[in-house]
Structure formats: C-alpha cells, structure tokens
Amino acid sequence: MITVENESIVKKKREAAFHAADMVEDGMVIGLGTGSTVSCVIHRLREFVEHGLHFTAVPTSFQTEILARRNGIRLVTLDEVEELDLAIDGADQVDRNGCMLKGRGGAHTREKCVASVAKRLVIVVTEEKLRESLNGSVPVEVIPFAYGSVRNVVQMMGGNAVLRESGGKDGPVISDNGNFILDCDLGVIDDPYRLEVSLDTIPGVAGNGIFSRYSKKTTLVVGKEKKIEVISF
Ligand code: 5RP
C-alpha cells in the first residue's frame, strides 16, 4: 500500500527511528518489523555496522530481509533464537494504554511472533498515530481456504470485512506466509484484548493486527514537531 506523507511527518519519523536504532547495543539479537519506519531504522543501523557494531536481526518480512541484507545486517531466522533482546517496529495506531493496531503492510502475523519473544518492544510512531482508542480497520490474515467463512463470522460480529487487493497485482494481496488479508472494520475498539482474542479464535485466522498484550514491555518512541517523546506503560 502506498501512502503519501508530507515533509514534516517524514522528518519526525526519521528522527524517531534513529532514536530507536540508537538503543541497539553490541552483541544484541534484535527483531526488525516491517514498513517505512523500520526502513529508516535499517538505514541508521547500516552506519553502526560500518563502525563495527556486532548484532544479529530476525526480519519479519521479505521487504525487511532484502533491505537488511543490502545494508550489511547479519540475519537469522526466528527458529534460531530463543528470545530477542529487543524488537523495533512501527505501528498504524497506538492507544492511551499502549495497545496497537498494525498490519497496513500485511506483516503483522510475523511481527507478532517476533514481538512475543522480545524482552523489550520498541515501537516508533509519529504523533499523528496516537489515539484515545483504536479506531481503524483490523487487518486479519486468513488462510485462503477459509476467507469466506472468516468474513461471515466478522459480519456476524457486526463488522465489515473487505478482501485486501493491491495496485501491483490483480486479485487478492498474498502475504509473505501465502495467505489472504481481510481488512475488518469493527468500529471503535474499546476493548482491544477482547477483540484480539475473539478474532484469533475464528478457524482459519493466522493472525490479526491488534497488539494488546505487550504494553508492559513496550517503549514507545514518538516523533513530534520539536522533540522526541519516549513513553513506557
Ligand atoms: C506492517 C506494519 C507496520 O509496522 C505499520 O503498518 C507501520 O508502517 P509504517 O512504518 O510504514 O507507517 O504493521 O505490517
């Protein structure tokens, strides 16, 4: 999905991403999320690699894998590590309690796997992404066989599920895991934990974009007009 951002947002994003990258220390094993914010993080990490910092990363998508390799970052797969010192990622929305909505880039299932084994989760956003309550469509990754039945359950829950399609290909977007993505509008999300668990229990769902369980280990880095704010929950 292509989003057009103004100069001020790009600057805030870059500064916050650099701040997050500065948290990486020698010898760490880190997780790298997906998206434009993480791309800025990777560009900063390249400088560290060039200056001799040793660290290893688990990428959460083909996009991140390719970019990280190009920038000299040593990669391993998730099955090669037991835990991660920290994971750095972006988000689409963050609420007042540190719950997040992710998955604009369709990488949320792997991102959640990585977040779950990270000792610390560093989420980088610009101030435009902060919300009182989450209120966007929830990306739900589904195995292709079950996309119709999952869509019906979401509709019975009072939501509207739209199969994600892309400008670069006819037909549905295929995730890095070979699945479809349903963007599910369920209105304002007052209870993210409940909705996250409900969506995950629908047969055929591989993962959804609500991240409600990691607030306590999250460090939120917010890019603002004149400063960077770092928030812990
Ligand atoms: C990808 C994601 C991204 O982290 C999220 O969409 C934020 O992306 P960006 O940094 O480009 O704004 O969840 O699935």
Image (spheres, grey):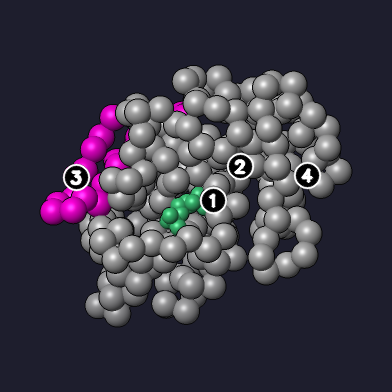
Neighbour tally class for label 2: few under 14, some 14-19, many 20 plus, Cα within 10 Å: many
Question: Where is mark 1, residue-wise?
Answer: 104
Question: Where is mark 3, residue-wise?
Answer: 229
Neighbour tally class for label 1: few under 14, some 14-19, many 20 plus, Cα within 10 Å: some
Find out whether residue 172 is within the magenta segment. Answer: no
Query: Is there CB contact under 8 Å for labels 1 and 2?
Result: yes
Using the image, tell me which numbered label, if any, was put on residue 139.
Answer: 2
Tell me the mark number nearer the camera, choosing from 3 and 1: 1
Name the residue located 36 percent from the left edge and 34 percent from the top edge: 131
| Lateral position of residue 102 relative to residue 222, left or right | right
Q: Residue 229 at what x, y percent from top left?
A: 19, 45
| Lateral position of residue 19 relative to residue 84, left or right | left
Q: CA distance from mark 4 to mark 2?
A: 13 Å
Query: Is the residue indicated by label 2 positioned so its CB lies within 8 Å of ligand 1?
Result: yes
Name the residue located 67 percent from the left edge and 22 percent from the top edge: 158
Name the residue located 80 percent from the left edge and 40 percent from the top edge: 147
Compared with 183, 233 (above or below) is above
Please name the amino acid that badge 2 sits on: Pro
Please name the amino acid that badge 3 sits on: Glu
Q: Secondary structure at mark 1?
A: loop
Query: What are the residue bounds of the magenta stretch?
Result: 211-233
Using the image, tell me which numbered label, if any, was put on residue 143.
Answer: 4
Q: Secondary structure at mark 3?
A: strand
Q: Residue 46 at what x, y percent from top left?
A: 34, 74
Please name the amino acid that badge 4 sits on: Ile
